[in-house]
Amino acid sequence: MITRLFTDHPESVDETYLEHARFAGGFSAWLLLAGLAAAVHAVFPFLFEKTASTIITRLHGRIHNRG
C-alpha cells in the first residue's frame, strides 16, 4: 500500500510520520545553516571559524542519541 512508503522508515526509528518530518526538517535547516556558514568562512576565514563544525558535532550527537 502506498501509505507504507511514508510510514515504514519513520516507524523503524520509532517515530510517527509527523515526528519524523519535524526531526528531518529541523536537521535539514541546521545543515543549510552550517553550509552557509562554511561558504562565508571560505571567503572570509576570520568569520564563523567554528560555526559549521559546532553545528555538525551537535547534529551528530542528536542523531546518535535519538529515542
Image (tube, rainbow, N blue to C red):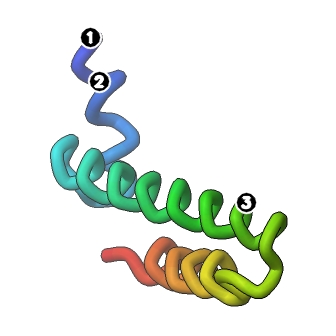
The disc labelled 2 sits on which kind of residue? Arg
Give the residue displayed 34% in from the left and 36% down from the top.
8
On the rendered structure, is 7 left or right of 37?
Answer: left
Marks 2 and 3 sit apart, C-alpha to C-alpha, by 38 Å
Judge whether 35 appears above or below 49 on screen.
above
CB atoms at circles 1 and 2 under 8 Å apart? yes
Give x and y (percent) for residue 60. Answer: 58, 77
Q: Amino acid at mark 1?
A: Met
Tell me where residue 18 appears, x and y as whole percent. 16, 45
Q: Nearer the viewer, mark 2 or mark 3?
A: 3
Kindly identify which residue carries mark 3.
Answer: 39
Q: Which residue is mark 2?
A: 4
Of marks 3 and 1, the one in the foreground: 3
Find residue 62 and name its label: none
Q: What residue lies at 60% left-to-right and 86% top-to-bottom?
A: 54
Residue 1's disc number: 1
